[in-house]
Amino acid sequence: MMKRNPSRIDYYERYQTIIQEFNAEQDKAAIEKTFIDLTNFVNDLDDEEKRYVREGFDNDEELAMYDLLMKESLTPAEIKKVKTLAKILLERIKETISELDHWTEKEETQAAVDVVIRNTLWSELPESYDDDALSAYRQRIYEFVYSTYPAA
């Protein structure tokens, strides 16, 4: 799940905490607490896996793009725009990558993907995202795409 959506790191950290607490205590109460914590954790993971449907996306990839684009204090209209942007951006990136041969191996092809990201963000992000934010989101998305879609 984390590979598909890096914003889920808190689930990994929560899992690690449960395991550390279990390893630190081996009495019956600690084991029961660990079991309850793990059960709750699994239920939360199930909810997270279904979140893309609740958010109105067709798949987990679109949700990952949305999570990478989100920031605090967006208006409902801006959130709607970011959701639309997540779908458009993912489609454009995948289309561009499909046209390139081993895109991660050459600077020109890497730049082509980066330009698609930049141009799409520039034209589609809500105005509340300033130029500095645009650069940060562009870099974050590029790194995600580079690690998630290494080949056409």
Image (cartoon, helix red, strand yellow):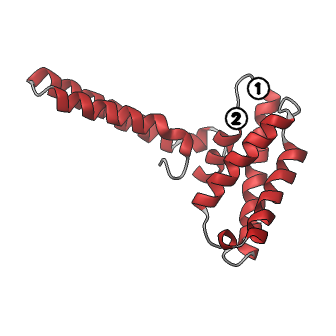
Q: Residue at x 61, y 46 (%)?
A: 64
The answer to whether residue 63 is left or right of residue 112 is left
Q: Quadrant of the C terminus?
A: bottom right
For disc 2, the marked residue is 70
Query: In the rendered structure, which amino acid carries the disc numbered 2?
Result: Met
- Give the tally of numbered discs: 2
- SS for dot 1: loop
Q: Toward the viewer: 41 or 110?
A: 110
Pointer 2 local density, CA inside 10 Å: few below 14, some 14–19, many at least 20: some
Taking the view exactly as shown, the residue that stands out farthest to the bottom is 101
Q: Position of residue 117 (x, y in %)?
A: 79, 54
Taking the view exactly as shown, the residue that stands out farthest to the front is 107
Q: Residue at x 29, y 28 (%)?
A: 37
For disc 1, the marked residue is 74
Q: Position of residue 109 (x, y in %)?
A: 76, 70
Q: Which disc number belongs to residue 99? A: none
Marks 2 & 1, CB-CB < 8 Å contact: yes
Q: Position of residue 143 (x, y in %)?
A: 64, 53
The answer to whether residue 103 is left or right of residue 75 is left
Q: Toward the viewer: 77 or 12?
A: 12
Quadrant in the picture for residue 67: top right
Q: Is residue 59 visible?
A: no
